[in-house]
Image: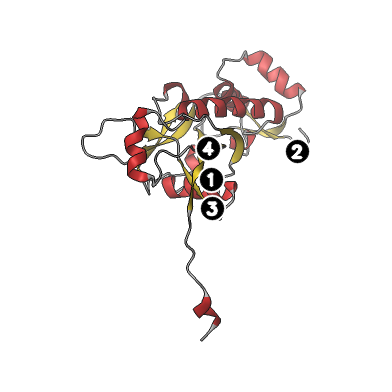
Amino acid sequence: MTADDYIQPVLHTLNPHVSVDCVVFGFDRSALHVLLIERKREQGDLRIKTALPGDLVWEDESLDEAASRVLKELTSLEGIFLKQFRAFGDPNRVRDVKDLDWLSSFREQPQARVITIGYYAFIRMSDFEPEASSFASRVFWQDIHSIPNLAFDHNQITEEAIEVLRADFENRKAGFELLPEKFTLSQLQSLYECILDRKLDKRNFRKKVLKENLITPLPEKQTGVLHKPAQLFELSQHG
């Protein structure tokens, strides 16, 4: 008998009271989107099935591990930095009548109280190709200005994630990595406007970012454009 004969298969047990929900924001250089799934439904079932990618955690994994696993299982996305931003623990958050049928079909304890940990991420949409799997029948990007009525309290989770994203962007410049390595001031302004959800005065914006020393001008201009080529910039190493 070898040592391998003593190795037992890992049997993961779900914790019925703790889940993770992932708010993945995508930027396509013109608008901000959020990644949603459509959960599998029974024929004729018209109840809400659109939700954030989320699920219960295993007893033997950390919350960060659970968030990465769940996102991969439902959307096939991996290698994404997910930031934990808040816990949501309203006693009635999963007890709405609109969610009971789905819970009864997919959860062993559908009446259990569930506290969820919210994670958010910010990615370039062109870098990833989400694919639905597990109990997700479809995965898709949705403009943040037209988010439908979601399952559970996922609308609230999404709204709070947007606020955290904006605060991180303004205070820590989180999200600047979504810019091309070399970019124009117009592209930078578009990123600001999409995340902050407001129009910015072109002249004042350019004076502000140059004064803050966030970017460094390059001795290069755009190529292959029909309009007058704009100067290119890169992020300052000390900005």
- The three-letter amino acid code for the residue at tag 4 is Thr
Q: Is residue 3 above or below residue 129?
A: below
Whole-percent x and y of residue 179? 60, 35
Q: Mark 2 or mark 4, which has the lower sequence index?
A: 4
Q: Is residue 57 visible?
A: yes
Q: Which residue is mark 1?
A: 67
Specify the label residue 237 is tagged with: 2
Please tell me how crowded label 2 is: few (under 14), some (14-19), or many (20+) other residues with Cα within 10 Å.
few
Q: In whole angstroms, how far apart are the C-alphas of marks 1 and 4? A: 11 Å
Indicate which disc, 1 or 2, sits on the residue closer to the N terminus. 1
In this rendering, the answer to whether 237 lies above or below 77 is: above
Residue marked by disc 3? 59
Mark 3 and mark 2: Cα distance apart in space: 42 Å
Provide residue 28's location: percent of width, then percent of height.
49, 32
**Which tag, 4 or 3, sits closer to the chain's start?**
3
- Element under disc 2: loop
Q: Residue lying farthest right?
A: 238
Q: Secondary structure at mark 1?
A: helix
Task: Name the residue carrying label 4.
Answer: 116
Specify few, some or many for label 3: CA neighbours under 10 Å numbering under 14, 14-19, or 20 or more: some
Could you tell me the amino acid type at mark 1? Ala
